[in-house]
Amino acid sequence: MNKSVDNLSKIKRSLTRRNRAEARFQWYGRVAIFIGLAAVAVLFIDIIGKGHGAFQATYINLNVSYDQELLGIENLSDPEQLVMGNWDALPKLALREKFTDVSGRRDKRRLYGLLSNGAGFDLKDRLLANPQLLNTTESIWLLADDDIDTYYKSWLDGEAYAARLSDKQVVWIDQLHEQGLIHLQLNSNLFTRGDSREPEQAGIRGAVMGSLLTLVLTLMLSFPIGVSAAIYLEEFAPKNKWTDFIEVNINNLAAVPSIIFGLLGLAIFINFFHVPRSVPIVGGLVLTLMTLPTIIITSRAAIKSVPPSIREAALGMGASKFQMVLHHVLPLALPGMLTGAIIGMAQALGETAPLLMIGMVAFIVDIPGSFTDPATVLPVQIFLWADSPERAFIEKTSAAIMVLLTFLIIMNTSAVWLRKRLERRW
Amino acid sequence: MQATNILILLFGFGALAFYLGRGRSLAIAAPLGGIRKLHSLPSYYGMHTAFWCALPSLILLALWMIFDEPVINSIVIGAAATDIAPSDTASYNLLLNKIGNLADGVLPRAGQSGSLIAAADHMIYLREISRWSLTLLALVFSAAGLFLGLSRIASGFRARPAVEKVMQNLLLACACLAIFTTLGIVLSVLFESIQFFRSVPVTDFVFGLDWSPQTAIREDQVGSSGSFGAVPLFVGTLLVSAVAMVVAVPIGLMSAIYLAEYASKRVRTVAKPALEVLAGIPTVVYGFFAALTVAPFLRDLGSSFGLTVSSESALAAGGVMGVMIIPFISSLADDVITAVPQSMRDGSLAMGATHSETVRRVVIPAALPGIVGGIMLAVSRAIGETMIVVMAAGMAAKLTANPLDSVTTVTVQIVTLLTGDQEFDSPKTLAAFALGLMLFIVTLLLNIFALHIVKKYREQYE
Amino acid sequence: MSPADTAKPAKAASKPAAKPAVKAASKAKSKPKAKTAAIKTRKAVAPKIKAAQNLDIADHQETVGKSFSDNAKMTMRNINVYYGDKQAIYDVSIDIAKNEVMAMIGPSGCGKSTFLRTLNRMNDTVEVCRVEGDICMDGENLYAPKLDVVELRARVGMVFQKPNPFPKSIYENVAYGPKIHGLADSRVDLDEIVENSLRKASLWEEVKERLHQPGTGLSGGQQQRLCIARAIAVSPEVILMDEPCSALDPIATAKIEELIEELSENFTIAIVTHSMQQAARVSHRTAYFHLGKLIEVNPTEQVFTMPQHQLTEAYITGRFG
């Protein structure tokens, strides 16, 4: 009894210290979670902060006269003449007419620098769509150069970034702004064009199409193969060394660095089988091998969750094992498998490193239309743009990231939704 | 005819065979008193016929596509005129490339030697023959298979077991793809690495302190005398991974503990998926974030304290990589912590231990094998991570342990060595495969070991 | 209700004494108000009730027998326990005397384990669990807001149904409590505590040669005695045992029972058991629980020879369980 009283006083004495330690420990946990969540928040805020501007582009309003002589074109339907046409002259003339006091070669070059060097081609497209405009004059909004775009946006935000502009250009933009001849409008180029060296003309259409083609191929290959492998391992595989070996292999492949799959693709598909480089086929093949383990593992889990009683019921009716699997197990496990497939596709959509190895990192302007057209994918496009020195590409990169993340969020939430919606509780 | 066309044709034949086989079984069954008299359902007879029709040709097609090129190549080179006959492997490959390009019309014929053009023509001719014989053989195979399949249909024929046997083997083949992938990785990486180690001794590669592959392709140097000492890359990789682990392990572990032990259900349902968002963000996004936001921030922060922080510091790359790995560690740790039986906690709490004492002295030690396994998997991930370091870490191989300095890693070098148009057999590109081999071995060992520990741990509490 | 009853509602209401079942039911509904009154009148009402007893628990109203003690170590009054919306314990009042072995018996799911776990607040770990009523040890309210459960659990030890040694060595298992509470001033002290505890748990002779091997390597019975040694290493005043022998073989059970008898010289013990024989062998008093209600408390001998309540009798004669 005495001893227990003694103990009690010792315990009592230790209590404050221990309760403080307890509180401290809980705070470590809270701080850790806070850091994790803060990282998510900072990342998103940073990307959105940098990228939201890219959805708008600066346009300058000018009076353009589609002068046949200036263009040097007699017949609009003659493709050869169209190629030879002096389209650049149209925006240049319009600029000179707007700022009549500009003279000297250097100043003129700066003046022309206000507009994107693709402005002439935009006018060509417009003229081809509306041939009656030939030899008329119209007031039209033309795409500004990326440096002008950067300056104008930063100036609107109150912290003008004029490092790449000459003083005269700044003055011209001021004048245009006062006259209401320069403004921001929706940047449709971002979604309708392929890659370009000029930031203001670069778009993600090509990369999105490339990603789509690659993913379609990946899904077409990896889902049936993955599901078949899962069915074999869960329903048919005998318990032996060979099956164990397959299992160990699958689990390991799921953890092999993705870049190794790129090396595999380079050595086997490109150098051995001579599949052309940079095309969605080879990208799809590599990503198939990479996502297979994920799909197999999730599909197996889905098959496992179908209760044995259903299998016994089917077998008891005299169904063959295959009929049992096809008619009963597979339909019940399908939602889980689809969820796994979506997660695997989301992984594949965000993957970059292996695609660098197989040449999907090339600069490709054209929008790919088939599995054998050279293409790049969205994450690789992000990588390429992030590497570009032009400041305007930062904005573009962030915008492309926003698009990529949007796709990923849609895919992941649909996977969660699918699981919740179709999941059966046994 | 192109292989893809043959493939489509074969599928068409397969569908046709299905209907024929099914129709025939129905025809056989009708006079006997309906399909009840058949052993299997009519569609099984159809499938059986379709398999007979399409499978042999498909196998033929696959084998043909694998062996077609090497065989043609060796015939072409063997028959080539002596003035262009290759002396060693390197010139063999070079010659083959040239002839192939000539045959494809990629290389203009003008100005090439007569024997080269002859060889190219020979190649074109052989390819044509190969293509036609493949088409013919495939057609013969399917037709023969179709008739054989149809002839076997009888009322007592056990079509279903036969079909199921074939399907089961197809499933097995799919499962074996994982093994072939591993095999493919091992072979491709190993094969090129061996070639590399022929020109650069293994010891120089593994223990060499100087890495400068660029010198190898300079004209004024002997082909393979660039230095390929990979130690600086290994050190750089370890440094970046260590920084990542310093960030990820405490934060991941503590969040897992908090979520598993303390958090109310509501906090858990919100915080857990929110943390897992980090795992779903593509690495290229982290790379962009590290290079354009974190690195400049750290550089400015460093200079305000009078420290020189490189703009491509290991700290920025590693730190961001750590953030990426947080959810990985926290979800693995969460799994193993919740697997510790409640009776352990009860035992400790009933002794009067506080919750944190219970966690630190009972739960964590009990979960330790699982946690260690999880951390090892995370390390293997950090070592193999590519995009973050490609975008945010440096290119220059420096032997340093200072996280504020810029280092390069194994994966960065693989990417730099292999992107762009290089001659495939140069030591520079082969070096990338040797690095890949190292990476594969290390991550494989880590993975096998970690997965083994985790599996053992799970079994213990199941 | 029968047609006759509906026809004469006034008559039925005017003769409550003739319809004890109705009375009990209505009283149960108005429990919160009647609570205090019920306690005061319990002793007076008890004898009358026996006449109305049957096996329907809805009729049960008061605990019969001697629930209270003059030498109480722990006093429980009007305990109600809820899991979310579900009530698990209904208005239980009982005392546990000093150095007494109190056995709690009853069919499975009757709430005896739940009740035991309220005594050292192990129910706190269950999020949805809520406890109402007063539980005092030596006059101190265990559910007082400023009471520290750490201190409480050091004073009220617990042994669980399934042996749960920590994945540590035998020595570390026993030393765990003294270490976290800072009871040992030196290594020698600690060694002494460990040895004493193991001796008290009659395990010393069996494990003294392998103190540093893992506790999980012992047999089931040894593991359970290790858990007892672990519990007594912090010299608690009360030891709670939650079916300590249910996972053990008969020989190991006999050893533990022997041990309980020895321990009762120094400790107050509350033991929940599934086995009536065990209760009969080890305990001084026995409490019978039924569907969350405390039916009867009496000296063990009396419970097993002439139970006061029909439910108790039905249980010990094996009519349900």
Image (cartoon, rainbow, N blue to C red):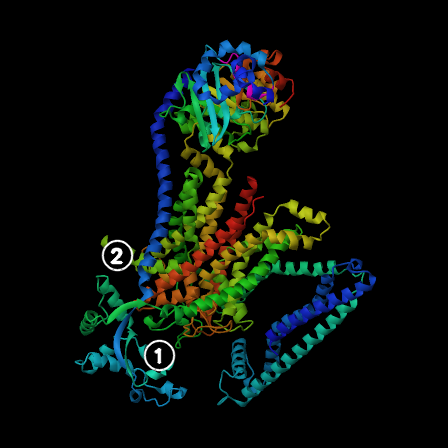
Q: Position of residue A202 (x, y in %)?
A: 36, 71
Question: How would you classify the magenta stretch by its main secondary structure?
Answer: loop
The residue positioned 31% from the left and 77% from the top of the image is A119
Q: Residues within 10 Å of mark 2 (few under 14, many from 20)?
A: some
Circle 2 residue: B300
**Residue C58 among magenta residues:** yes
Q: Nearer the viewer, residue B418 or C313?
A: C313
Magenta segment: C55-67
Q: Position of residue A111 (x, y in %)?
A: 22, 77
Instruction: Give the chain of mark 2.
Output: B
Q: Quadrant of the C terminus of chain B?
A: top right
The residue positioned 54% from the left and 43% from the top of the image is B458
Circle 1 residue: A126
Q: Nearer the viewer, residue B195 or C228?
A: C228
**Residue C156 among magenta residues:** no
User: Is residue C308 visible in this depiction of the protein?
Assistant: no
- Cα separation, mark 2 vs mark 1, equals 48 Å
> Can you tell which quarter of the image residue C310 is in?
top right
Q: Position of residue C311 (x, y in %)?
A: 60, 18
> Quick check: B300 left or right of C153?
left
The correct choice, above or below, for C33 with respect to A420 in the image is above
> Quick check: B82 left or right of B41?
left
Q: Position of residue A154 (x, y in %)?
A: 24, 64
Residue lying at the far right in this picture: please name it.
B32
